[in-house]
Image (cartoon, rainbow, N blue to C red):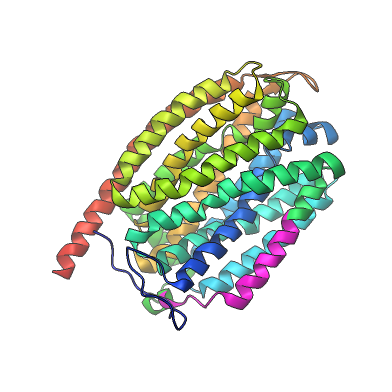
């Protein structure tokens, strides 16, 4: 049983009525624009990994320094999200979205202009301070505009941005980097983001329905009120563990493929292209299935599959590129089967008047956990010289399996909270 749905803005004239079976014209626009927003945010964050071998050589970075660059984004994003959480339900979500997205664009320009470890580190901190909040605002918009019975599909479509970044963004970004240097990739992100920001300003309607439910608590009191709720803390713990496992391999994936598996740098776009194509097919399918059957069962299936494939992947020796592509595709099938149902379940935990604060804290913990995971990876993985194989990469795989098991238990608790809340809503309606 889904939670009560409170429309926050009128749909444009001529739209079809919404429901579990379909979306209105305006809802389809919201899905598209949020997916495009996430595409640029995810691409900016994910592109660091494919560029790892180029950047390690061009900027003469150690593995620990590169881990710090990757983690700087996540940790600064997490801090910004927590600071913004108390204010997240006090403003029109559209205005909040544009403020932080504009800062993200400026930070990405600084990334493109970076010329050494120090300037790149500062640029990633600035980008994270703004970009990390965009995801939480987008999640709050989803929970405001779509009923729970629709959110599995919405999460599937919006998180297709992850696949899109691999199909289009990362291969194109790598091609640009191979020809004009790694800076060109960040300029590409800036150009895309400017186009998307223009559409958001012109087409997205104000989202203010949550303002009618606000109390007189000041932002800090609202933040404390949100953190105090036990059910919310369960959701926060689950998100933290999900992110710790999810981001641990990311910083050194390309460096591992180039130096350990001996995949040529010029062939990396092909690996990411096929991985992204498979994710593009799987994401909507998983979203649709998770709306029809128990979301937790889908999550468990994904966790088992991902655990097996992570161990296989992190222990790879030199193999043909088609083997790498097949393993990558199956591994990401498992990872996506975890992300979609987990996001849908977590979105159902907060009450409407807490959604902005909850999503902001949740996104902050996700970013900070990802930053900690990247820093941990930088300390575990060792490269003794340029072109040398990475050592201890498989250790990360074993650690991830343990984290997957813990997160499975936490998501089970989240699913119980959601079912109990749905039962209470049913009683209230009767």
Vertical comparison of 43 with 430: above or below:
above
Left or right: where does residue 59 sit relative to residue 83?
Answer: right
Residue at 37% from the left image edge and 65% from the top image edge:
22
Residue 129 on image: x %, y %? 64, 56
Residue at 61% from the left image edge and 71% from the top image edge:
200
Residue furthest bottom as drawn: 13
Name the one closer to the observer, 296 or 217. Answer: 296
Residue furthest top as drawn: 317
Residue 50 appears in the picture as rendered = yes
Left or right: where does residue 420 sit relative to residue 392?
Answer: left
Q: Is residue 191 magenta?
A: yes
Residue 332 on image: x %, y %? 51, 36
Q: Is residue 151 magenta?
A: no
User: Dominant secondary structure of the magenta stretch?
Assistant: helix
Number of dots carrying numbers: 0
The residues colored magenta run 189-209
Query: Quick one: quadrant of the N terminus?
Result: bottom left
Residue 236 appears in the picture as rendered = no
Vertical comparison of 111 with 3: above or below:
above
């Amino acid at each position: 049983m889904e939670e009560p749905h409170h429309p926050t803005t009128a749909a444009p004239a001529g739209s079809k009525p919404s429901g579990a079976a379909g979306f209105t014209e305006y809802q389809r626009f919201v899905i598209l624009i949020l997916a495009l927003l996430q595409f640029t945010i995810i691409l900016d964050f994910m592109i660091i990994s494919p560029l790892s071998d180029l950047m390690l050589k061009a900027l003469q970075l150690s593995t620990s320094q590169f881990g710090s660059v990757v983690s700087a984004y996540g940790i600064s994003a997490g801090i910004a999200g927590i600071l913004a959480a108390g204010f997240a339900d006090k403003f029109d979500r559209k205005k909040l979205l544009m403020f932080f997205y504009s800062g993200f664009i400026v930070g990405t320009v600084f990334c493109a202009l970076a010329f050494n470890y120090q300037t790149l580190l500062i640029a990633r901190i600035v980008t994270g301070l703004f970009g990390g909040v965009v995801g939480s605002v987008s999640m709050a918009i989803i929970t405001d505009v779509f009923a729970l019975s629709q959110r599995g599909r919405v999460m599937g479509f919006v998180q297709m941005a992850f696949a899109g970044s691999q199909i289009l963004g990362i291969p194109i970004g790598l091609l640009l980097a191979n020809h004009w240097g790694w800076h060109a990739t960040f300029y590409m992100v800036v150009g895309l983001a400017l186009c998307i920001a223009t559409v958001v300003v012109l087409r997205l309607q104000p989202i203010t329905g949550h303002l009618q439910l606000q109390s007189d608590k000041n932002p800090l009191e609202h933040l404390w009120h949100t953190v105090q709720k036990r059910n919310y803390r369960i959701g926060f713990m689950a998100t933290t563990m999900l992110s710790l496992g999810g981001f641990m391999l990311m910083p050194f994936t390309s460096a591992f493929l180039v130096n350990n598996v001996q995949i040529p740098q010029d062939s990396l776009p092909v690996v990411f292209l096929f991985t992204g194509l498979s994710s593009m097919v799987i994401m909507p399918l998983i979203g649709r299935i998770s709306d029809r059957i128990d979301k937790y069962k889908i999550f468990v299936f994904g966790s088992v599959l991902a655990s097996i494939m992570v161990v296989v992947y992190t222990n790879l020796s030199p193999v043909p590129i088609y083997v790498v592509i097949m393993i990558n595709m199956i591994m990401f099938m498992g990872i996506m089967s975890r992300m979609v149902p987990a996001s849908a379940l977590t979105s159902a935990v907060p009450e409407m008047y807490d959604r902005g604060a909850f999503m902001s804290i949740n996104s902050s913990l996700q970013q900070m956990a990802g930053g900690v995971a990247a820093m941990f990876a930088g300390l575990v993985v060792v490269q003794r010289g340029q072109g040398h194989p990475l050592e201890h990469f498989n250790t990360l795989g074993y650690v991830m399996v343990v984290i997957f098991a813990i997160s499975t238990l936490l998501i089970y608790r989240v699913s119980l909270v959601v079912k109990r809340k749905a039962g209470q809503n049913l009683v209230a309606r009767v």
